[in-house]
Amino acid sequence: MKKQFKAESKKLLDMMINSIYTNKEIFLRELISNASDALDKLYYLSLTDKDIKINKKDLEINIYLDKDNKTITIKDNGIGMNKEELEDNLGTIAKSGSELFKESNDLKKNIDIIGQFGVGFYSAFMVAKKVTVKSMSLDNMAYIWESDGADGYTIKETKKDGIGTEITLYLKDDDNDTYTDLLDETKISNLVKKYSDYVHYPIKMKMDDEVKTLNSMIPIWKKSKSSVKDSEYNDFYTDKFYDYEAPLKVIRSEVEGKCSYTALLFIPSHAPFNYYSKEYEKGLFLYSKGVMIMEKCADIIPDYFSFVKGLVDSEDISLNISRETLQENYQIELIAKNIESKIKKELESMLQNERETYEKFYDNFGMQLKYGIYTSYGMKKDVLKDLLLFKSSKEKKYVTFKEYIDNLKDNQDKIYYACGETIDKIDMLPQVEAVKDKGYEILYLTDNVDEFVLKIMMNYDDKTFVNVCDDDLDLDTKEEKEVLEKENEKNKDMFAKMNEILAGVSSVKYTNRLKNHPVCLTTKGELSAQMEKTLNAIPNSPSVKAEVVMEINVDHPIAKKLEKLYKKDKKEFEDMTKILYAEARLVEGLEIDNPTEITNLICDFLAK
């Protein structure tokens, strides 16, 4: 006689199958985990009951595929279930025999029992139209449990060779979903490798007329550190993460405490082709007791370390009833905090002791560290600031902020930087030449995000960051300032007229910061010309405008030429003003709004 499930109704089982589990292929993971639990229970009892004589080497899980009858069978020689246990564990949804076993035997970490909620078995109905469970317990009585879904189940006495459990899935007919591909040996082998590779009992299946063990059983991260060779880590990394090159760094961490875990992390030697795109998905593999739970656990690693590949295996993580997602965030937050700290320490050590290796890493992933400061609005600057590198004018080599500080001139209280597309182009800036002549080291900022990062940081070790193209760059002596102020006051009407001619300029003035160059552009306020260029290049973004100042070299012959034209030839004065402004924009690497007009003006001057 068919019995009804004790857990209310068809609706609950439908929810189990269609809502709790989002990935149909995990049915195999769940059934293998249950089989592993059954083997663990039998082995544990054999340690305390002398009447139970087993050899742990004989304990195993077998998978059988029957293509003719469209069935998959998972068989174990574990503890098995009697009639009452079949009734309780399979007839009551969400009742866990594994959990009861742990409670009744006062088990904590003595044995790895995977099952917690008693619902994993029902994932079988995602792919099967009928399921049978044939089981024999230690009382040597065998029973078969059979169900075709939420309508109910039957339990009858049967015959079976030896204790253990044998679950047979009668696959659904193909419709919008394909189920018959689960009868392919390679498919099943890959699923075992993906989810259950580290179940510590052999999982066997006949392939190519030969019974093969599908799982490796012992994870590389569970082996003693001294027994694992670098080549083994490299092989594991290239195989697991589909990389053609060995990792730059291997990080292994074992933590005991409120949330114990083992982490095996890798820093790749190169960035994936899609790393700086929306398609890239960060995250670490998450294992619980050797069973893969999540392929991309994003919460366990911060965005600025998203280049790190690897895995975390923990027995303490609380999972939801489908084992697909995490239940208690504080455990993940604790692991994530420790992972962040470990990665930071390893990078600092690499920077200190393996400079060449670190610079190779930085060429690939330094941008992500900068974005970490920028996107956190500076909240993560204390975590990341000492990992940043910039090329400097001293030797055109990478330096840290600390190294820059160590080389400061006497009484220097600023960190000078300049922005541009390349180091060579930055060196051509008139403002850079002037600062170099004063003996100050300059940091070269060649990535679009660089200046935004320094603006957010504001300072390092109480030394403020200053763009050499800032209008208020203060490198002059008191006497030099007084002389310059007199020249600017004397020609204020001329500058007012030039400012009127140049609509995109906030002011015009003389400067003594230039050597051989006739003119340059500087900016007032927080928005520099390079920041304006970067922001305006973002699609669909509102246009922004830097407050630009045109500075003319007071010691250049062009200054006297301008003064002369202002007094005698207003038209030529206006033309020269436009040409000088265009020249200054070109030197800064900025676009010219009216190139045709400017080229015509230059031709007119050349023709005179």
Image (cartoon, grey):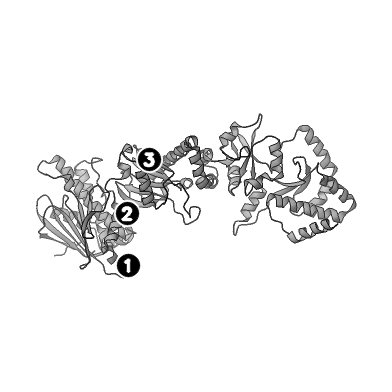
Could you say where residue 181 lies in the image, as x and y percent from the top left?
A: 29, 65
Residue where numbered disc 1 is placed: 177
Residue 192 picture quarter:
bottom left
| Vertical comparison of 210 with 510: above or below | below
Drawn side of residue 191 relative to residue 92, left or right: right
Please tell me the numbered disc located at residue 194. Answer: 2
Q: Earlier in the sequence, mark 2 or mark 3?
A: 2
Give the total of numbered labels: 3
Q: Which amino acid, mark 3?
A: Arg
Viewer-side residue, 132 vs 226: 226
Question: Alpha-carbon distance for marks 1 and 3?
Answer: 41 Å
Q: Of circles 2 and 1, which is in front?
A: 2
Residue that numbered label 3 is attached to: 252
Count neighbours of disc 1 (C-alpha within 10 A) and say few if under 14, some if 14 to 19, many if 20 or more: few
**119 left or right of 156?**
right
Q: Position of residue 395 (x, y in %)?
A: 61, 38
**Label 2, label 3: how far apart the Cα atoms are:** 21 Å
Rendered position, 477 above or below 219: above
Which quadrant: the C terminus? Answer: bottom right
Residue 72: image tag: none
Residue 322 showing in the rendered view: no
- The residue at 41%/45% (across/down) is 266
